[in-house]
Image: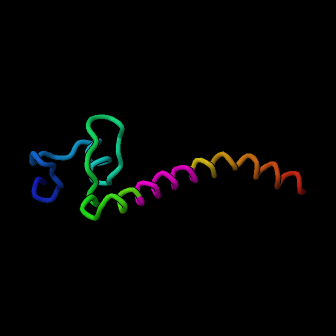
Amino acid sequence: MSEVHARNKNFEPYTCSEACCETTGWYCGFGTTKKSSIDQYGVAVVQYFRFLKYLAGFFFIASILSIPVLYFAVKSMS
């Protein structure tokens, strides 16, 4: 199994937080801030994708919050 599973820098299996945060580029909010895998392309590229990530989260939350409004709007039309 150790031949096919991904390993961290110490050649140990990834923990749950490492697999979630380090490999996907998401920042978990604990520990030290890790560098993204796209840092080699420059600050502007990193900021652009970080902005897209936060914008996607915002639109997801906004769409969840708009469900009751849509429900009552459709219900009042019939």
Q: Which residues are magenta?
A: 48-60
Residue at image location 35% in from the left, 49% down from the top: 26
> Residue extending furthest bottom?
41
The quadrant where residue 3 appears: bottom left
Quadrant (top left, top right, bottom left, bottom right) of the C terminus: bottom right
The residue drawn where x is 51% and y is 50% is 57
Residue 69 versus residue 26: which sits nearer the camera? 26
63 relative position to 58: left or right: right
Q: Residue at x 20, y 46 (%)?
A: 14
Say how the picture is coloured. rainbow
Foreground of the two, 3 or 37: 37
Give the main secondary structure, helix, strand or loop, of the magenta stretch.
helix
Q: Position of residue 64 (x, y in %)?
A: 63, 48
Locate residue 35, reporting x and y percent. 26, 50
Horizontal arrangement in the rendering, residue 25 relative to residue 48 (left or right): left
Left or right: 1, with 76 as reference point? left
The quarter in which the N terminus is drawn is bottom left
Q: How many marks?
A: 0
- State the image coordinates of residue 75 (x, y, percent, origin top left): 84, 52
Nearest the viewer among 43 and 72 is 43
Q: Is residue 28 above or below residue 75?
A: above
Residue 16 appears at what percent x and percent y? 28, 42
Tell whether position 40 is magenta: no
Q: Toward the viewer: 34 or 41?
A: 41
- Quarter of the figure with residue 45: bottom left
| Residue drawn where x is 76% and y is 48% of the image | 69
Q: Report the residue that reaches farthest toward the top.
A: 30
Q: Indicate whether 68 appears above or below 4.
A: above
